[in-house]
Image (cartoon, rainbow, N blue to C red):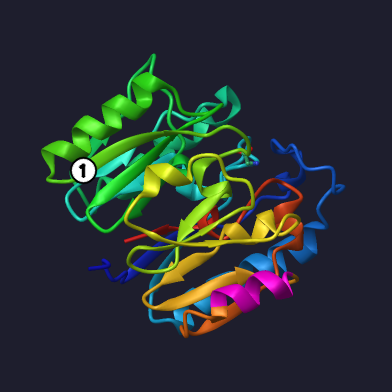
């Protein structure tokens, strides 16, 4: 059974949003357009029935609007991460002050590193990507916290791409979408896989919200494959966030 979401937390990008980390070679984001795309994303979440808490920009932390990386939420606990990129560690104090009002808090401690973008829930199991941002210690710490709360967990080596969720996401239940050539498909045995065409990797960062699927605009083949599940699909303009390695999932914490 999928957990239904009632809330989301997002953060407005700051004027320095073009100064964050990125591996994309797509140029600098147009900040007014980025803000408009971000605002449209929020409106989609609201239209899908979520109560959205919008946090203000965090000065000095240009990646802070990728809020998903700073925490992992379950109904029982808010796990504050220790982002793998040192430049993002300044984000956690602010997110902890918000989430501590909603859940008991647990923390990933040094030497562990963990980005929420490496954490994918599929029913009662969490897949934790070991990546350039998430190390064995961070993955193990999170796994043990989740286990105490009744969840299964499994570590998946992420060969390429920024995060686990750069390559695989849930489309509801055990239906998953993968980027072409994802090396770790075997880790997801028992799941149904939609594998996208080469060149459509960015669309593997699709977002399930209570039965509706958000997909980045501009990938018609990927959209067609995802539509075969007969669930409502919404296109979301993401061109400016993509320039900063941002995707649909990392723009919000959903719970
Ligand atoms: N710009 C998102 C990240 O690299 O963490």
Q: Position of residue 109 (x, y in %)?
A: 33, 21
Circle 1: is it few (<14), some (14-19), or many (20+) Cα within 10 Å?
some
In-image side of 99 versus 186 (left or right) = left
Q: Nearer the viewer, residue 219 or 23?
A: 219
Asked whether residue 152 is in view, the answer is yes
Task: Please provide the residue range marked out in magenta.
Answer: 219-226
Furthest residue to the top?
Answer: 111
In-image side of 146 versus 8 (left or right) = left
Q: Residue at x 61, y 55 (%)?
A: 247
Furthest residue to the right?
Answer: 27
- In the depicted structure, whether residue 152 falls above or below residue 197: above
Q: Position of residue 102 (x, y in %)?
A: 23, 54
Instruction: List the residue tagged with mark 1.
Output: 152
Whereabouts is ligand 1, in terms of quadrant?
top right
Q: Residue at x 73, y 55 (%)?
A: 198
* The C terminus sits in image quarter: bottom left
Q: Is the magenta region chiefly helix, strand or loop?
A: helix
Disc 1 within 8 angstroms of ligand 1 (CB): no
Q: Residue at x 55, y 31 (%)?
A: 88
Q: Nearer the viewer, residue 112 or 191?
A: 191
What is the total number of numbered labels drawn onto the structure image?
1
- In the depicted structure, whether residue 60 falls above or below residue 123: above
For numbered disc 1, what is the local secondary structure? strand
Q: Residue at x 26, y 33 (%)?
A: 143
Q: Nearer the viewer, residue 143 or 67?
A: 143
Q: Position of residue 97 (x, y in %)?
A: 34, 43
Q: Is residue 216 magenta?
A: no
């Amino acid at each position: 059974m999928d957990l239904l979401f009632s809330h989301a937390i997002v953060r407005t990008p700051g004027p320095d949003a073009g100064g964050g980390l990125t591996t994309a070679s797509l140029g600098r984001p147009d900040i007014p357009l980025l803000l408009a795309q971000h605002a449209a994303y929020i409106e989609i979440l609201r239209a899908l029935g979520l109560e959205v808490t919008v946090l203000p920009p965090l000065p000095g932390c240009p990646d802070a609007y990728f809020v998903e990386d700073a925490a992992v939420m379950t109904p029982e606990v808010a796990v504050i991460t220790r982002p793998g990129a040192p430049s993002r560690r300044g984000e956690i104090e602010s997110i902890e002050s918000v989430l501590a009002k909603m859940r008991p808090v647990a923390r990933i401690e040094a030497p562990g590193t963990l980005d929420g973008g490496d954490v994918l829930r599929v029913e009662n199991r969490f897949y934790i990507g070991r990546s350039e941002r998430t190390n064995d210690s961070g993955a193990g710490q999170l796994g043990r916290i989740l286990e105490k709360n009744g969840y299964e967990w499994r570590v998946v080596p992420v060969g390429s791409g920024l995060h686990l969720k750069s390559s695989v996401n849930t489309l509801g239940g055990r239906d998953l979408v993968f980027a072409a050539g994802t090396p770790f498909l075997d880790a997801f045995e028992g799941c149904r896989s939609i594998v996208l065409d080469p060149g459509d990797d960015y669309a593997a960062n699709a977002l399930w919200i209570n039965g509706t699927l958000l997909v980045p605009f501009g990938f018609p083949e990927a959209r067609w494959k995802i539509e075969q599940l007969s669930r409502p699909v919404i296109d979301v303009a993401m061109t400016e966030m993509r320039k900063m390695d941002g995707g649909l999932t990392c723009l919000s914490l959903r719970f």
